[in-house]
């Protein structure tokens, strides 16, 4: 049985030496004042990991919220992503993101989607250079298959440190989970609630047993598997409640029951 640990103290070890907070705030579709407020509330609540992307169109708001928080840059983990269609302008894309957020580096830079359904080896080489030049501390991919990750490794000798994919109990796949572990790639899940129904009887029964919400059970399930989770909300109370799981520890039987919701 896992111990009840504050989610904000939990980290995944990256192969490049860094540490990625297991809980972050997703910012898809958060723009303008709504984005700044949500990010500000999350930082007040103890989040130290913010996930954005060039395609989200909110990097300026992310940067502004970070500055307004007064939290030192080295206490935060900042992720952004390059659109797949930006092949050939990788460095310019990253530099534009840094300017928009008014920072000199990001902590993690991801290829948002496989370019043209390929592994994108040429782009990956540029990602490696950007890490070497200190513009990003870690590099990874998003929405990649294990075969595409292997192709990048074979072509460059550098394995992505992270793969961010759509993940939830209903999408749990042991082979994919184990495949990332075997390659030393941190698995990061997005859309933890939307990708799987929070009204599933298994989740509801476990939530009732712990006097928790189904969303809290899903977050804790991610954490106990060592999977990074980035729930998104624009509501202050949900930003706080979603990760209020310090007193929640799922049993081995409960973890197995939730795993069983996958295909």
Image (cartoon, rainbow, N blue to C red):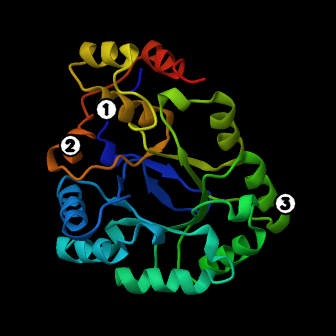
- Image quarter where the C terminus lies is top right
Judging from the image, what secondary structure is the residue with disc 1 in? Answer: helix
Q: Is residue 104 visible?
A: no
Tag shown at residue 215: 1
Left or right: 42 as drawn, with respect to 229: left
Judging from the image, what secondary structure is the residue with disc 3 in? Answer: helix
Where is residue 246 drawn, in percent x and y? 26, 35
Q: Please, is residue 169 above or below residue 27 in the view?
A: above
Q: Sequence order check: which comes first, mark 2 or mark 3?
A: 3
**Residue 249 is drawn in which quadrant?**
top left
Where is residue 122 drawn, in percent x and y? 76, 74
- Front in this rendered view, residue 83 or 70: 83
Q: Sequence order check: which comes first, mark 1 or mark 2?
A: 1
Where is residue 233 drawn, in percent x and y? 27, 49
Q: Which residue is mark 2?
A: 238
Q: Are marks 1 and 3 in contact (CB under 8 Å)?
A: no
Judging from the image, what secondary structure is the residue with disc 2 in? Answer: helix
Tag shown at residue 57: none
Q: CA distance from mark 1 to mark 2?
A: 10 Å
Q: Which residue is mark 3?
A: 154
Where is residue 138 drawn, in percent x and y? 56, 67
How many badges with numbers are in the image?
3
Q: Residue at x 46, y 12 (%)?
A: 253
Label 3 neighbour load within 10 Å: few <14, some 14-19, many 20+: few
- Front in this rendered view, residue 34 or 257: 34
Q: CA distance from mark 1 to mark 3?
A: 39 Å
Label 1 neighbour load within 10 Å: few <14, some 14-19, many 20+: many
Q: Sequence order check: which comes first, mark 1 or mark 3?
A: 3
């Amino acid at each position: 049985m896992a111990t009840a640990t504050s989610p904000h103290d939990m980290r995944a070890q990256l192969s490049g030496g860094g540490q990625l907070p297991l809980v972050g705030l997703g910012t898809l579709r958060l723009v303008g004042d709504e984005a700044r407020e949500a990010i500000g509330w999350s930082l007040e609540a103890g989040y130290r990991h913010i996930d954005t992307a060039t395609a989200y169109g909110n990097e300026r708001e992310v940067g502004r919220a970070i500055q307004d928080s007064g939290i030192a840059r080295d206490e935060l983990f900042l992720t952004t992503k390059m659109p797949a269609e930006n092949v050939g302008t990788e460095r310019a894309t990253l530099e534009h993101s840094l300017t928009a957020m008014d920072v000199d580096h990001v902590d993690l830079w991801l290829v948002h989607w496989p370019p043209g359904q390929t592994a994108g080896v040429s782009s990956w080489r540029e990602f490696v250079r950007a890490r070497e030049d200190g513009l990003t501390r870690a590099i990874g991919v998003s929405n990649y298959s294990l075969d595409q990750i292997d192709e990048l490794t074979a072509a460059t000798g550098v394995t992505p440190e992270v793969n961010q994919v759509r993940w939830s109990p209903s999408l749990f796949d042991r082979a994919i989970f184990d495949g990332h572990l075997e390659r030393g790639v941190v698995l990061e899940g997005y859309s933890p609630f939307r990708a799987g129904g929070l009204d599933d009887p298994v989740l509801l029964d476990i939530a009732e047993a712990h006097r928790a919400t189904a969303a809290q059970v899903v977050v804790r399930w991610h954490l106990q598997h060592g999977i990074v989770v980035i729930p998104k909300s624009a509501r202050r109370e949900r930003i706080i409640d979603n990760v209020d799981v310090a007193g929640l520890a799922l049993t081995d039987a409960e973890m197995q029951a939730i795993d069983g919701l996958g295909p």
